[in-house]
Amino acid sequence: MLAVDWVDPLKLHVVIDSTDISTNLETFASGALYVPDYDLALGQHHVVITVADMAGKAVTAEATFTVSNSGGASVSNLDIADGMVLPDMAEIWTQGTRGDQTTAVTASVNFGEELAFNASGGDVGKLLPLERGTNVVVITAKRGQGDANSYALKLVRTDRYRATITSPEFGTFANGQAQQVTLYVSTKKDEGLPEETTLASVNVNGVDATPFGDPDENGNQMYAVTLSVPCDVYIWALTVYIHWADNTLDQVPLGLLEGYFITRKETRTISDRGSFTGGAGHCLTAPVWSWNGSRTDITSLFANPCTNPDTTITTATSSVNPPTARFAVTCWPCSMPRGPKRSNKSRTQTEVSSPNAPALIAINPLSARS
């Protein structure tokens, strides 16, 4: 793969081990691609690349690389494939499995910058941008210094047909629960052209989808399917398989479910209900008010079926009588002379007699005496 800008494509020459392969290059607006149609011999190889700009100024670069049969960094189980014909989509979810957890995976699109894949365990994935027309996607697995393998794929973004997942949203957390997927697909491909064909069937991740309703004014048919999300995956691409009446198939990853799930969630709600009893008495007699009631303690437990397949959502409720709370009345000023226009006001402060009693209870002032 070569990334070249502002060069004359007729003056791009590549020689590998003294063999000029320039006429075998696939050239694009921003680069060139060469995929040998034979296995290179084991051992070291030498490549010489010469390019020239439109003014004829040439530059030469050389490099060596080694072909080994000892394995090496790898990525497999990709959800994209060379030659895919895609609907008009600006991004595509690209997912695979790396050889081991020391392997880093990157991708470049149309000879652009390297984009690092997200990784969780052995799973790797990344939303890759697409331009209209042919896109050259080069996925590279790297491990340590000098250990790398690259995979070159061509994906074609077209308007030959339409397909979109409408729900769930991209990246929805499945939480181990079955998910209903709704989507639409155009009823025709290459509409109006000699090669026009009609839609035969649709499935998502190998499960047949059921059409519902009539096609809309744009000729799109809605489908629905319920998928059981595997418990042992973290990222799960939603790949749509579209079968046409001419026996052709288009395969396109249109969505993503994330398999991260809640292993356990416990919610506890405590509420207290009751009433106050007692008398104010005289401020010098330290009157006591008591609160009597009940406490409701509700615990809701959600256990994920992936980790606890026999457990469902449960609710436990218990009622207890908490210890009585005692409240001492503080009066002031008790020595104030009493008269028709004088008042002796009192207030309360909480004095909880047990740490298990309600922590905060408000009481209005007891009285105002003249």
Image (spheres, helix red, strand yellow):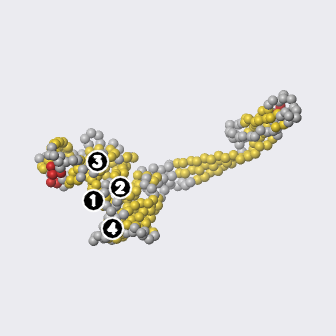
SS at circle 2: loop
Quadrant the C terminus occupies: top right
Q: Residue furthest right?
A: 339
Q: Residues within 10 Å of mark 1 (few under 14, many from 20)?
A: few
Residue 142 drawn at (x, y percent) = 29, 44
Badge 3 amino acid: Gly
Q: Residue furthest left?
A: 18
Q: Indicate whether 249 appears above or below 110.
A: below
Q: Is residue 223 left or right of residue 130?
A: right
**Discs 3/1, front:** 3
Residue 94 drawn at (x, y percent) = 35, 53
Badge 2 amino acid: Ala
Q: Are marks 3 and 2 in contact (CB under 8 Å)?
A: no
Residue 40 drawn at (x, y percent) = 18, 50
Badge 1 amino acid: Gly
Q: CA distance from mark 2 to mark 1?
A: 17 Å
Q: Which residue is mark 2?
A: 90
**Discs 1/4, front:** 4
Q: How many marks?
A: 4
Q: Residue furthest top?
A: 335
Ranked by sequence position, the earlier of labels 1 and 4 is: 1
Badge 4 amino acid: Lys
Front-lying residue, 286 or 91: 91
SS at circle 3: loop
Ranked by sequence position, the earlier of labels 2 and 4 is: 2
Q: CA distance from mark 3 to mark 2?
A: 16 Å
Residue at point 12%, 49% (across, down): 19
Q: CA distance from mark 1 to mark 4?
A: 17 Å
Q: Residues within 10 Å of mark 3 (few under 14, many from 20)?
A: some
Q: Is residue 172 left or right of residue 330?
A: left
Residue at point 41%, 64% (across, down): 184
Numbered badge on residue 189: 4
